[in-house]
Amino acid sequence: MRDAPHRHTASVPVFDHYLGQLGGLLDIAEAAGDPAVLDARLIAGMLPFGVQVEIACNFALRACFPLAGEPVPPYGDFPGTFAGLHDRMARVRTMIGLLPPAAFTRDTPISDQAGCALVTLPPDTFLFQYALPNFFFHVGAAYHILRQRGLAVGKADFDGFHKY
């Protein structure tokens, strides 16, 4: 079992940082003045930009709360608008930020719905092989939708570390 600070450090600050970056991408999309971007998809059958943002937010809750031994709170009911997505993101960042590092000691398996499958995984496997990759899948999809739409976003917008 990993110690509590390790699990907390590997989850809450990571989700918080990249939700902040996703908020910046949302700002760029909103500034473009085309609300249709909320419904834009990379390809038919994929989820649209707004839903990608929503799912990324929800994954932060779905990961952090079980790791802290708490039930996943309701996601909240927010409109699928730029303002609604910003409000959802702010709520999630506040909620995960309130989880105490010492609570991240769960050593029993965590179950989560993965599409039509129910996965049950040890906490470290849940975080590193399931929750974080799924979170980044949706953040990455949102980023790529904006690139596909011709918006001027780059790696620096995605990770907040690169400078060009």
Image: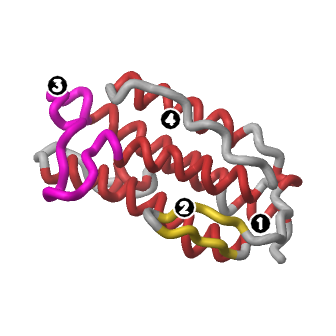
Q: Quadrant of the N terminus?
A: bottom right
Q: Earlier in the sequence, mark 4 or mark 3?
A: 3
Q: Are marks 4 and 3 in contact (CB under 8 Å)?
A: no
Seen in the image, is 130 located left or right of residue 13?
left
How busy is the neighbourhood of tag 2: few (under 14 within 10 Å), some, or many (20 plus)?
Answer: few
Q: Label 4 vs label 3: CA separation?
A: 20 Å
The tag on residue 33 is: 3
At horizontal 81% and vertical 74% (from top left) the residue drawn is 2
Circle 4 Cα neighbour tier, 10 Å, few/some/many (<14 / 14–19 / ≥20): many
Residue at which label 2 appears:
113
Q: Answer whether labels 1 and 2 touch (C-beta < 8 Å).
A: no
Of the pair 127 and 148, the residue shown nearer to us: 127
- Closest to the camera, between mark 2 and mark 4, is 2
Give the class, few, some or many, for how many residues have Cα within 10 Å of label 3's Cα (few <14, many ≥20): few
Question: Percent x, y for residue 75?
Answer: 56, 37
Residue 93: percent from left, percent from top: 60, 38
Tell me where the magenta segment starts and ends, as one range: 29-51
> Looking at the image, do the residues carrying marks 2 and 4 touch, with CB atoms under 8 Å apart?
no
